Structures are given as C-alpha cells and as structure tokens.
Amino acid sequence: MPILRAFRGGFDNLLTARQVAQRLSVCADTVYRLCERGELPHVRVSNAVRVSNADLAEFIARSRQNYGV
C-alpha cells in the first residue's frame, strides 16, 4: 500500500524528473530508474513523476554517506 504524504508549499516544491536529472547531472532515465527501484522518493501525478526538494536533499545526503563523499 503506498504511503501518502502532504507537501508544504504545494507544487512549487515539486521537481520534474528533468529538473532532478539536471541537479544530479544525470539523464532523466536514471531518475526514473531510481524512482522505480524505490531509491528516490517521489509522487506520481497521472503519468508524471515529481520529487520534493526535501526528498532530493535526503537522497543526496544518503548517497554521500553510502559512498563516503
């Protein structure tokens, strides 16, 4: 069962897959794969993937810890 969460500030705080890809310096397909594997928390609005700034920051922090950066 999916977990539903509220986002503060509405849609302004949600990033598209393309925006996330630009911030991570990867392609959008990589972002979609991270979401599919459950590594990057996201919400789906119909066919669109959206990621909150907070979830992206947490993902980056976890990645740094995992890889010792």
Image: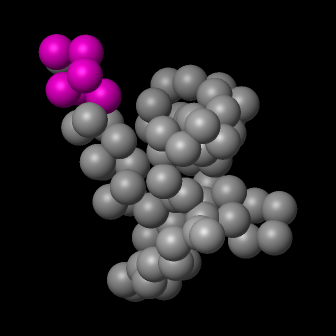
Part of the protein shown in magenta:
63-68
Q: Is the magenta stretch mostly helix, strand or loop?
A: helix
Rendering quarter of residue 65: top left
**Residue at (32%, 60%) from the top-left corner?**
54
**Residue at (48%, 39%) from the top-left corner?**
39
Q: From the viewer's perspective, is 29 left or right of 41? A: right
- In front here: 13 or 56? 56
Check the picture and name the quadrant holding the C terminus: top left
Q: From the viewer's perspective, is 31 left or right of 59? A: right
Residue 31 visible (yes or no): no
Q: Vertical placement of 23 versus 10: above or below?
A: above
> How was this image coloured?
one colour
Residue 50, horizontal then vertical, whole percent: 60, 60
Q: Vertical placement of 55 versus 5: above or below?
A: above
Residue 53, horizontal then vertical, whole percent: 38, 59
Residue positioned most to the right: 47
**Residue at (83%, 62%) from the top-left corner?**
47
Residue 57 visible (yes or no): yes
